[in-house]
Image (tube, rainbow, N blue to C red):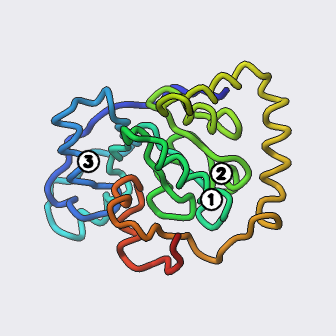
Amino acid sequence: MLTRTLTRRIRVLGPSLEGLRGYAPRAADAAAAAGTDDLIVVDEESPPLPGSSSAAAAAAIADTAPYVLQPRVLIYDGVCHLCHRGVKWVIKADKHAKIRFCCVQSKAAEPYLRLVGMDKEDVLRRVLFIEGPEAYYEGSTAALKVASYLPLPYSALSSFLIIPAPLRDAIYDYVAKNRYNWFGKDDECLVTKDKELLDRFIDREEMLGGGPSNSF
């Protein structure tokens, strides 16, 4: 189990940042309505914001914008057939929509990876579950932590957490290493055919933008 204390600060942004990378009005509104305890708000170290509201000034500080991130996000290999079967299974079992998803190959995954100090190759090796502002999990622990949020009988799978992580991850790593050969893969991230399910995906805007063409 890996844990890390994460920075949770909000810095007020000017309207000139709207529409730029990392600025999400809907997420910001949710944070204001629900409070920050159920969201992950990251303010990267940066110089004070310029007073100018010009587009040029906004673009110059886009990389300093804080990200309002969702909790309970499963970041997975978007081209892996086995991974997509797992995602579809979780969506079907997760009646209360507690878990959200994000393809690691998407731009939307980047702030989550920076948050926990990981890169894409780490997630391609082991799936990543960001539970909240103080903890994240990899591999078999990530999968079982996701199961713990599902209703019975599926949540009973989390009881396998009592098995030592090295043993669980040895099995996980063996399957992960062979998943492409056994189950196949695509060249681009798969996109769900069910438009109603897109709200469960952090990278839904990229899916709707017409980038990936494959579907499941």
Left or right, 112 with respect to 55, comes to right
In space, the residues marked 1 and 3 are separated at their CA atoms by 24 Å
Residue at 78% over, 59% down:
179
Q: Which one is in front, 4 or 127?
A: 127
Left or right, 112 with respect to 185, comes to left
Instruction: From the top left corner, tell me how far across and down residue 42 is, in percent.
Output: 38, 39
72 in relation to 174, above or below: above
- The secondary element bearing badge 2 is classed as helix
135 in relation to 61, above or below: above
- Please tell me whether mark 1 or mark 3 is closer to you in this view: 1
In space, the residues marked 2 and 3 are separated at their CA atoms by 24 Å
Amino acid tagged 2: Val
First along the sequence among labels 1 and 2: 1
Amino acid tagged 3: Ala
In space, the residues marked 1 and 2 are separated at their CA atoms by 7 Å
First along the sequence among labels 1 and 3: 3
- The quadrant in which residue 187 appears is bottom right
- Please tell me whether mark 1 or mark 2 is closer to you in this view: 1
Label 3 crowding class (10 Å Cα cut-off): few <14, some 14-19, many 20+?
some
Q: Which one is in front, 173 or 123?
A: 173
First along the sequence among labels 2 and 3: 3
Tell me whether circle 1 and circle 2 mark residues in contact (CB < 8 Å).
yes
Residue 123 numbered tag? 2
Instruction: From the top left corner, tell me how far across and down residue 19 is, in percent.
Output: 24, 64
Residue at 51% over, 28% down:
152
Which residue position is annotated with label 3?
27
Residue 12 numbered tag? none
Residue 77 numbered tag? 1
- The secondary element bearing badge 1 is classed as loop
Outermost top residue? 162
Residue at 45% over, 31% down:
132
- The secondary element bearing badge 3 is classed as helix
